[in-house]
Amino acid sequence: MNLNFRPLNASLRKKAQHLLIQYLPPFTTPQDLKYALVKHNVPGIKNIAPIYKRFRPADAALVTLASPNHLQEAMQRLRRFEITGLEASPEPIIPPEEWLVVKRNRGHQGRKEASERGIMDGTGPWAGLGGSKWAEKAVVLTGFPGTTPVATVGDFLEGYGVSESKGEKMIYKIPLPPHANTIFSKFLVLMNTGEDAQQVFRELNQKPLLSRKQHLIQAQLIY
């Protein structure tokens, strides 16, 4: 999945302290990437965030450097950057502002409103969840009939550790992209812990709905 950014001119390059690394092997974790960067002696690594597009891995990551002063040396170290034997593509970028700011929709009420307004798209670092704190507790469930309400998904997850805010379960219907040709719906679920998210994945991925056995639920983790 290609993320297109214009190459930086010399002036912007002096200000850049982020690297976009694309064409990573599938399922590369931030820990995997950090290990590879350290192995290449890349200086000033401050943060690594996997990038998603509509809650699907983009096989890319945003690397934040501690200072723009590290950029030139980092690019020199990464001239031939490989991870698990495959060549990846790093490039300096100025990330979109929405990738960096703390959005209002990061809280439960904001996410709920974003879902209802159709603007929760799961695109950007950590799928737009604001960091690993919530991302590691997140599960995306697909395969429900298109008209399924949030309450039905809550019943489906009865007995699992779904996180709550003021008595409301943190379950959000993900808006479909324009002109989507599907009869299924998708939901973002935030669990109490990463272990709870792993349990949902292990036990419910590829599980048929009791009411419609032709519908298989698919579970996906944000890592």
Image: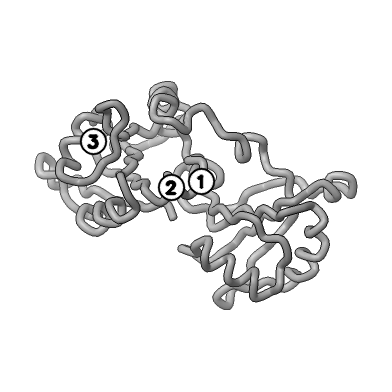
Residue topped by disc 2: 135
Determine the residue positioned at 81% across, 65% down: 73
Determine the residue positioned at 10% across, 39% down: 211
Residue 12, quarter of picture: top right
Amino acid at the residue labelled 1: Gly
Residue topped by disc 3: 145
Determine the residue positioned at 89% across, 45% down: 11
Residue 147 can be seen in this image: no
Label 1: how many Cα within 10 Å (few below 14, some 14–19, many 20+): some
Left or right of residue 13, residue 223 in this image: left
Residue topped by disc 1: 131
* Image spot of residue 209 (x, y percent): 15, 44
* Image spot of residue 129 (x, y percent): 47, 41
**Which label sits in the foreground, 3 or 2?**
2
Find the distance from the CA under tag 1 to the CA under tag 3: 30 Å
* Image spot of residue 149 (x, y percent): 24, 28
Number of marks in picture: 3
Left or right of residue 40, residue 195 in this image: left
Amino acid at the residue labelled 3: Pro
